[in-house]
Amino acid sequence: MAGLTDEVVSKSQQTAAVVVDALVGHDAPAPEASAQLHAHFDKYASSTSQEGVKLMTQVDFIEAITPPPNSVAAAYHKIPREQYGILFLVADRSQKGQITVQDYAFFENLLSKPDAEYEIAFRLFDRDGTGVVNFNDFIQLYKENKSADALPFDWNSSWASLYLGGQKARRELTYAQFSQMLRGVQGERVRQAFLHFDKKSTGHITPAEFEEIIVKTQKHKLSDHLLENLHTLCNVGLSSKISYAHVRAFQNLMKDIDLVEVIVRKAISKSKDGSITRADFINEAAQTSRWGTFTPMEADVLFHFASLDNQTGRLSIHDFAKVVDPSWKPSERLSSEKAAAAVSSGPKPLQTVLKSMYNFGLGAIAGAFGATMVYPIDLVKTRMQNQRVTVVGERLYLNSIDCAKKVIKNEGFTGLYRGLGPQLVGVAPEKAIKLTVNDIIRDYAKGTGPEGKGVSLPWEIVAGGTAGGCQVIFTNPLEIVKIRLQVQGEIAKNTPGMPRRSALWIVKNLGLLGLYKGASACLLRDIPFSAIYFPTYSHMKKDWFGESETKKLGVAQLLISGAIAGMPAA
C-alpha cells in the first residue's frame, strides 16, 4: 500500500513539474564548454574563487568578446567598446558580477542561435528569468542604459500602448510579443524623432537633424560611406531640406538591405559589362519579388548614395558595396588598419610558400597542355624556316600544309611530335615562372590604376615584360634543343647514314654556354611579346567581356581573349 502511495505521489510531482515547465519555462542546462572555449576563457579570466575556479569580470568579458583596437574588424567609431559591457548582464545569470566558464559557454551558445539578437534583448529585460518582460522593469532598465544625449522616446504613445497596454492596464510581454515589438520599435523611434525636430509640422527637417536621427538610431548598421554622406540625402529632391517621405524611403531601404544586395548581384550577373542602371535594378526587383518591393523613391535613394563617386549612371558591385556592406571603409582608412595589423602579425611564410607552389603548379600544367596542343604547328614552322633549296628553283616544302604532309609521309604521325619531350620538360618551369613573376608584380602594383583601383597600364607592361625576360632562363636552352631535334629528321632524310641524336647528347655536346647562344635574340622576342600579351589579355577579359568579382568568364571567352591577345604580341 505504501509503495502504491509513493508511486502516486511521484507521478503527481512529475505531472506538476511538466505543467510548471510548460507555463513558466526553464533555462536549458549550460552547454559543455569545449577545450577551445576553455582556453579562450582562461586567457581572459583574471579572478579566482575561493574554490580555485577561474572567474571573468565585466572588464575581462569585454576583452574576450571584442576585437583588438587595431584590428580591421574593430568598429569602435560606431559602437564604443564599453557599450559591449551591457551583454555581460545577459552572461551573468547569477547576477554576482562575475561569470564562470559555464556562463560563458551559455552566452556563446546563445550567440549561435538564429534569433540571437532578439533573445539576448529579451533576457536582458527579463531580469528575474520568469519568461516574461514586466513593463516597470523594462522602463527602469531602459532609463539606466539611455545616454544623456539620446533622442526622446514616449513609451506612453499610442504605438507603444498597442504592445504594452494603456497606462492603467499595463501587460507583460512574452518572448514572441517582445521580439515583435522590438522589430517595430526602430521605425517608431525614427518617426518620433522626426516629430521632435519638426515642431512646426512642415513635414521637413534639416540635413543635420536627419543625420543626427540616423546616427543615434542605427549608426552600427551603416557603412562609413553612408555615415559620411547622410546630409546629402536632400539632393535627391529639389528642396534644401529632407521630407518625411525621404526619411521613410531611407529607413525602408536599410531594413531590406540584404534583399537589395541580392537583387543587385542578380542584375549585375546578367550585365555584359558588370554594371547596371536604375532601370536594371527596378526590373530585377520586380522579377525577384512577387509584389513591388521598392518604390521609385527608394531606388532613387539607393542610386544616390551608390553613385556619389561614379556619376556615369552605370554602377558596379564596388559602388553598391559602399551602401550595402556595413563593414565597408574608405580605402585609405582600410589600408592604414591593414598596415597596422600587418606590423603586428606579419605574413606567414608557410602561406606564402604554398601560394607560390600553387601558382607554379598551375602554370606548369597550363604550359604543358598548351605546348602539346600546338607542337605540330611549331614543328612545321621550324621546318619551313630552316628548309634549304637542294636544286635551284626547287623548294623542299611548298607551304605549311605540304610540309605537314611530307613529315607524316616520311616520318609517320609521331614525326609531328619529334622533340616534344624536352619541350615538356622545359615549358613547365618556363610558363610557371612567367605567370608567377607576372602575378607577383601585378600584386605589388595593385592600387596604381584609375581611382586607386586595379593596376595601371605602365605597371601591366612592366609586369609582362619582366616575366618575359625571366622566362629566357628556360626558353633559350629549350629552343636550341627543340629546333635541333625538329630538323634532324629532315637532315637524316637527305643525308644517308646520319645518326639520330637524343636530347641529352645535344645538351652534352653544346655545353652550358652553347645552350645560351642567341639569348639576346630570345630576350628581344620574349620581352616585347609578354609586355604586349599580358596587358591585352587582361583588358580583353575585363573591358570586352566584363569580367568582375561577380561575373566569371566561360571557357570560350577566355580562349578568345587569349587568341586575340596573342595576335599583336606575335
Image (tube, grey):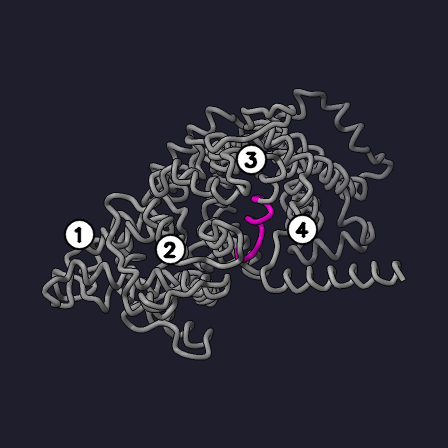
Residue 51 in the image, given as x and y percentages of width and height:
65, 25
Residue at which label 1 appears: 208
For label 1, the SS is: helix
Q: CA distance from mark 1 to mark 4?
A: 67 Å
**Magenta part of the chain:** 107-115
Q: Earlier in the sequence, mark 3 or mark 1?
A: 3
What residue does disc 4 label?
374
Q: Earlier in the sequence, mark 2 or mark 3?
A: 3
Q: Please tell me the numbered disc located at residue 67.
A: none
Q: Nearer the viewer, residue 404 or 264?
A: 264
Position of residue 72 in the picture relative to residue 503 (left or right): left
Q: Nearer the viewer, mark 3 or mark 1?
A: 3
- Label 1 is placed on what type of residue? Ala
* Front-most of residues 350 and 159: 159
Rendered residue at 29%/66% (across/down): 249
Give the x, y percent position of residue 39: 63, 30
